[in-house]
Image (spheres, helix red, strand yellow):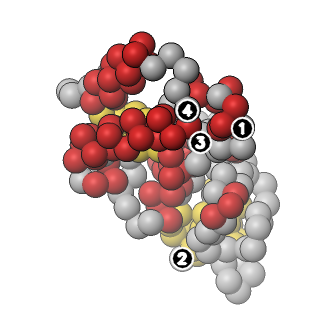
Amino acid sequence: MSDIHLATFHSDEGAEATLDHFDVAMFVGGMGMFGGMRFSADGGGGRGRGGGGPRNVPDQDWVNVHGGQNNYRGRYISQLSRDGKDRLPRDWDVHHVIPQKFRKHPEFENFDFHHPTNLRGVEGARSNDNIHSQITTEWRNWEASNPNPSRVEIENFANQIEQKYSQYYWENQ
């Protein structure tokens, strides 16, 4: 591994530690202990917002996620950590409840597609059961029959998908 500064951690008492070697994939958006200090990701190089300890910024959940607002996997994993849930396995996908395909739909103009409330952990192509593909196929079939859906119609179908597949979601395991 290289000697690249990845994060600085601060205790409530003002002590500081720098971590240069670690598995980024195991840390991004995470919280934990290092050298007896509580920490959360700060994007590398600073105290971040509010010093040491877990951060919970509901309207800006992405503030401390590497890659920022568009890193939906990081945002989802960060939310799991804040909720005290186990980390999403690497071979699982992050599914958008309201698919990204509708980004340009006029009724979703100010909708944050990558917000953790619109994300679910599902087994994907890298795992034994590709639940993500099954969901995507259902959306494609529905879209073929509904070429110009309203937001209400999209949300109603999303709710049907949620009811059918929620038993497979990581957060419900």
- Residue 50's place in the image compared with 20, above or below, is below
Report the amino acid beneath label 3.
Answer: His
How far across and how far down the image is residue 106, in percent? 70, 31
Q: Which residue is mark 2?
A: 36
Query: Whole-percent x and y of residue 160?
Result: 32, 40
Q: Which label is found at residue 114? A: 3
Which comes before the other along the chain, label 3 or label 4?
3
Q: Nearer the viewer, mark 1 or mark 2?
A: 1
**Residues at discs 3 and 4 in contact (Cβ within 8 Å):** no
Per the model, the C-alpha gap separating discs 4 and 2 is: 52 Å
Front one among 125 and 156: 156
Which of the two discs, 3 and 4, sits closer to the camera? 4
Q: Nearer the viewer, mark 4 or mark 2?
A: 4
Q: Residues within 10 Å of mark 3 (few under 14, many from 20)?
A: many
Asked whether, in this view, residue 102 is left or right of residue 160, the answer is right
Q: Amino acid at mark 4?
A: Ser
Going 61% across and 68% down the picture, which residue do you hit? 56
- Label 1 – label 2 distance at C-alpha: 45 Å
State the residue position of label 1: 109
Residue 124 as seen in the image, left or right of residue 116: left
Q: Judging from the image, what secondary structure is the residue with disc 1 in? A: loop
Q: Secondary structure at mark 4?
A: loop
Q: In the image, 16: left or right of 165?
A: right
The quarter in which the N terminus is drawn is top right
| Residues under numbered marks 4 and 2 in contact, where contact means CB atoms less than 8 Å apart | no
* Dot placed on the residue nearer the N-terminal end, 4 or 1: 1
Query: In the rendered image, which residue does mark 4 sit on?
Result: 150
Tag 4–tag 1 contact (CB < 8 Å): no
Q: Identify the amino acid type marked 2.
A: Gly
Q: Is residue 126 left or right of residue 17?
A: left
Element at label 3: loop
